[in-house]
Image: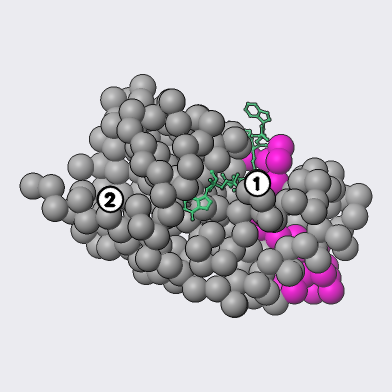
């Protein structure tokens, strides 16, 4: 069985990583357009670097939860028949044991040199304008996909959705494209579709099945069910 799982901020919420759009979410005090666009970065690089430096530092204070670990068990069993796509920029899937994770919106722990196009693993700060170890230029930005930029891995994702038997969206509001349209690609390719979310999202009607509750309960239960199938 070929499975594509898409995760959003809700899967990391119980680890203590704030979501974007819930009450007390990350963007409650911010206009996303002031921190998550290339134009915002150009207008006020110090603010944007600070925003991401803070979030990168906060990763050291959180741990993966039962939902991340359950998806790692699923990968152990399905191998290459699972594609785990995450919109999250944290590294909790990897720390929960997943080995193959497609970060379509980039990663906090990566920096991108806009001078030489190199990517570097990064755990420190960028606000102090460190030099790129490749070209020496001080032109590093967070390796994050901002509004108006092309998400990563779209060809691989579309192919996997087309070939999938099952598409599952976990902990995402379904308000951001192109991820919000994945359910339609999967459906067009003949896949079963399932939403697992704390509450029914606005797009729940696009899915054939849905379950509501916290990810740390829903995801391990769903994985156990799937693995128990003959
Ligand atoms: C729980 C829970 C618990 C809570 N258990 N659940 C019209 C049509 C098509 C596109 C557009 C359009 N208008 C504008 C666009 C383009 C734009 C877009 O979608 N804008 C929308 C606002 C409308 N998209 C783009 O610009 C993208 N690029 C693009 O489209 O390029 C062209 C292209 C098209 C087609 C193919 C290829 C290319 C880029 C989008 C980049 C998004 N980046 C962000 C910010 C990253 C930086 C950062 O992290 O700061 O990524 S936006 C932000 O939202 C972040 C997230 O990954 C993303 C999704 O959020 P998510 O994960 O869904 O979080 P929430 O908070 O919204 O929801 C949490 C959910 O969890 C809730 O439902 C809760 O109930 C639930 N939950 N606790 C289970 N315990």
Q: Position of residue 34 (x, y in %)?
A: 83, 48
CB of mark 2 near ligand 1 (< 8 Å): no
Q: Is residue 158 above or below residue 66?
A: above
Q: Residue at x 39, y 60 (%)?
A: 216
The residue indicated by pointer 2 is 222
Element type at marker 2?
Answer: helix
Q: Which mark is residue 21?
A: 1
Q: Is residue 190 above or below residue 66?
A: above
Q: Is residue 49 magenta?
A: no
Q: Residues within 10 Å of mark 1 (few under 14, many from 20)?
A: some
Q: Nearer the viewer, residue 11 or 112?
A: 11
Q: Residues within 10 Å of mark 2 (few under 14, many from 20)?
A: some
Distance from Cα at disc 1 to Cα at disc 2: 25 Å
Q: Residue at x 88, y 63 (%)?
A: 46
Residue 224 seen: yes
Q: Nearer the viewer, residue 41 or 67?
A: 67
Asked if residue 110 lies left or right of residue 51, the reply is: left
Q: Which residues are magenta?
A: 125-150
Q: Position of residue 38 (x, y in %)?
A: 79, 46
Q: Residue at x 18, y 53 (%)?
A: 227
Q: Is residue 143 above or below residue 97?
A: above
Q: Position of residue 125 (x, y in %)?
A: 75, 74
Q: Nearer the viewer, residue 47 or 19?
A: 19
CB of mark 1 near ligand 1 (< 8 Å): yes
- State whether the magenta stretch is mostly helix, strand or loop: loop
Asked if residue 21 lies left or right of residue 87, the reply is: right
Q: Residue at x 47, y 37 (%)?
A: 200
């Amino acid at each position: 069985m070929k499975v594509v799982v898409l995760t959003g901020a809700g899967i990391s919420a119980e680890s203590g990583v704030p979501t974007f759009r819930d009450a007390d979410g990350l963007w409650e005090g911010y206009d996303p357009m002031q921190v998550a666009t290339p134009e915002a970065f150009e207008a006020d690089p110090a603010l944007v670097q600070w925003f991401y430096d803070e979030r990168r530092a906060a990763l050291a204070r959180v741990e993966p939860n039962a939902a991340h670990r359950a998806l790692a068990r699923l990968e152990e069993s399905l191998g290459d028949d699972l594609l785990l796509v995450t919109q999250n920029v944290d590294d909790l899937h990897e720390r929960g044991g997943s080995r193959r994770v497609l970060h379509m919106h980039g990663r906090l722990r990566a920096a991108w040199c806009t001078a030489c196009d190199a990517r570097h693993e990064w755990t420190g700060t960028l606000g102090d304008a460190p030099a790129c170890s490749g070209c020496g230029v001080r032109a590093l930005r967070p390796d994050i996909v901002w509004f108006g930029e092309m998400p990563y891995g779209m060809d691989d994702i579309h192919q996997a959705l087309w070939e999938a038997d099952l598409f599952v969206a976990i902990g995402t509001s379904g308000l951001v494209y192109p991820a919000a349209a994945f359910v339609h690609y999967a459906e067009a390719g003949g896949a079963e579709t399932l939403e697992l979310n704390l509450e029914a999202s606005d797009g729940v009607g696009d899915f054939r099945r849905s379950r509501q509750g916290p990810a740390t309960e829903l995801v391990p239960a769903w994985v156990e069910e799937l693995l128990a199938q003959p």
